[in-house]
Amino acid sequence: MPQGKPEYVPDDGLTTRQRRNRPLVMVHTGPGKGKSTAAFGLALRAWNQGWPIGVFQFVKSAKWRIGEENALLALGRLHAETGEGGPVFWNKMGEGWSWIQRPGTEADHEADAREGWEQIKRDLAAETYRLYVLDEFTYPMKWGWVDVEDVVTALAHRPGNQHVVITGRDADPRLIEAADLVTEMGKVRHPMDSGQKGQRGIEW
């Protein structure tokens, strides 16, 4: 593909510009690290374009402070103060459902996940954001807390020009089939294989 020229041009009646600007559903999955990191990199690019960004974090604890959150919220404050970039909104769904001791019952977390998805659907209908980062969203679908078919249908019928990136391992085949861009992160080697953990404030 020299100079970014696609190998196949669909006969869909769209111009190159229209096709380039078509909103995408993106999935970052696989056993390797970097799925969320790549999604937040997209968020940085979106902020630079002045897009409203909505982050919905589905697994990490609501009590955790993570670097991406601090950085993006700081950029959101910069936008509010100066008009530079775009607004940023960060939503945490529950208290963390896979990596820490759960303080509530599984039913409580399931209800939180479902309400988080219902809020996303309301935002999609209202065209609240230009970019949605649904971080670790594959897990509620894998656990049966959120219906995959409902997700696929809502994303397929979202109005306007709203991009959505979903991260997490074990993405459902139906979600992969419905996505426009799917990246699978593979694991070749990891520092934890030799007992090394990430430095404080940095997640490997």
Image (cartoon, grey):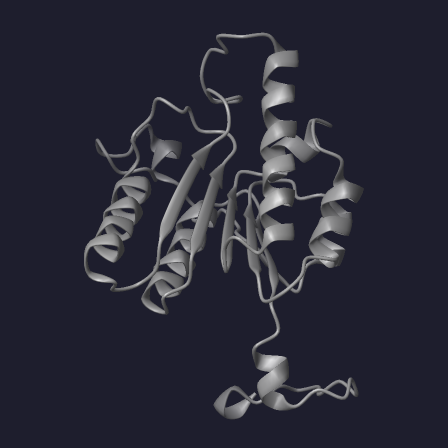
Q: Position of residue 43 (x, y in %)?
A: 40, 57
Q: Position of residue 194 (x, y in %)?
A: 34, 32
**Dividing the image into 4 quarters, which one contains the N terminus?**
bottom right
Q: Quadrant of residue 149?
A: top right
Q: Quadrant of residue 139?
A: top right
Is residue 36 toward the left or the right of residue 83 in the image? right
Question: Considering only vertical position in the picture, is 165 above or below 168?
Answer: below
Q: Position of residue 7 (x, y in %)?
A: 66, 87
Is residue 193 toward the left or the right of residue 65 in the image? right
Is residue 16 toward the left or the right of residue 86 in the image? right
Question: Considering only vertical position in the picture, is 6 above or below 67?
Answer: below
Q: Nearer the viewer, residue 36 or 51?
A: 51
Residue located 34% across and 38% down the image? 191
Is residue 81 toward the left or the right of residue 177 in the image? left
Total marks placed: 0
Residue located 60% across and 52% down the image? 126
Q: Nearer the viewer, residue 90 or 128?
A: 128
Residue located 30% across and 63% down the image? 85
Q: Position of residue 3 (x, y in %)?
A: 48, 91
